[in-house]
Amino acid sequence: MRDCFSKADQVKLENWEHKLRHCLGSRALLEKWIFVHAAGVLFAKKPGELIIMKKDMFGLNAPACQAITASFCRSWNLEHLLLYDNGHSLKIILYRAADVDRRIDTASKKILHCVLKYPFGLDSAAFLAEVARRWHASGSIPHEIGIALGYPLKDVWGFMGISADSCSGSCGWKIFGDPEPSMKKKHRYEKARALASHYIHAA
């Protein structure tokens, strides 16, 4: 089963599994849950993943869940940020900073700065901190988070009503314009999650 992963990922898997053998049951269960939900970031070049973690998940309180998330991210060289806490669940983004940086660089500067009023000179940390601030201020998720989640930019802008492209379908997110690149991305992300889920259940 491990042969399905790259050699670099196989090393990370081995080190992560070694760590899990020394974890209490609930902690190991949460790390495995995160592993499956973050598989697109780990194995399919998805810049980030929004994890919605219910309070008392696996009998763990919110501080424990955040600590375990941080530990998981250290094991896999990911960054993370708590974006929103509504009292019932934690909305945490796990991401690769360099990949989110590249997405920000390729996003339309006119839309990002002039229409959405994001400041200039953004990197991943500053962008996501502003997303969190706006989420707390409005109580609603800012749809531009799709930039960091790896959705095609045409779909992000289309969903926000910024572009003239018409809706052409859905694949877990709404597709605008040509559906082919969106479906290819969705397939890649789903394949990574299926692989991670199979790996966990086969272990």
Image (cartoon, helix red, strand yellow):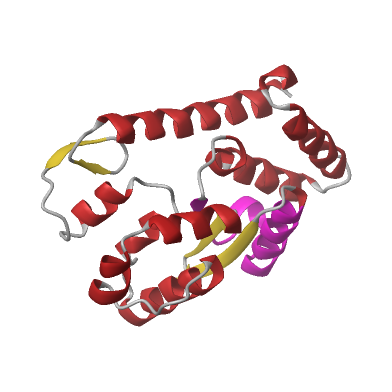
Residue at image location 58% in from the left, 25% down from the top: 195
Residue 140 locus on image (x, y percent): 31, 69
Q: Which residues are magenta?
A: 48-74
Q: Tell me if residue 132 can be seen.
A: yes
Q: Quadrant of residue 167?
A: top left
Quarter of the picture holding the C terminus? top right
Closest to the observer, 158 or 194: 158
6 relative to 23 in the view: left or right: left
159 relative to 22 in the view: left or right: left
Q: Quadrant of residue 42?
A: top right
Above or below 62: residue 166 = above
Residue 135 locus on image (x, y percent): 38, 73
Q: Quadrant of residue 44?
A: top right
Q: Tell me if residue 53 can be seen.
A: no
Residue at image location 77% in from the left, 49% down from the top: 75
54 part of magenta stretch: yes
65 part of magenta stretch: yes
Closest to the observer, 63 or 198: 198
Above or below 71: residue 188 = above
Residue 137 locus on image (x, y percent): 35, 82
Above or below 67: residue 121 = below
Residue at image location 82% in from the left, 48% down from the top: 24
Residue at image location 36% in from the left, 76% down from the top: 118
Residue 141 locus on image (x, y percent): 34, 66
5 relative to 7 in the view: left or right: left
Closest to the observer, 122 or 176: 122
Quarter of the picture holding the N terminus? top right
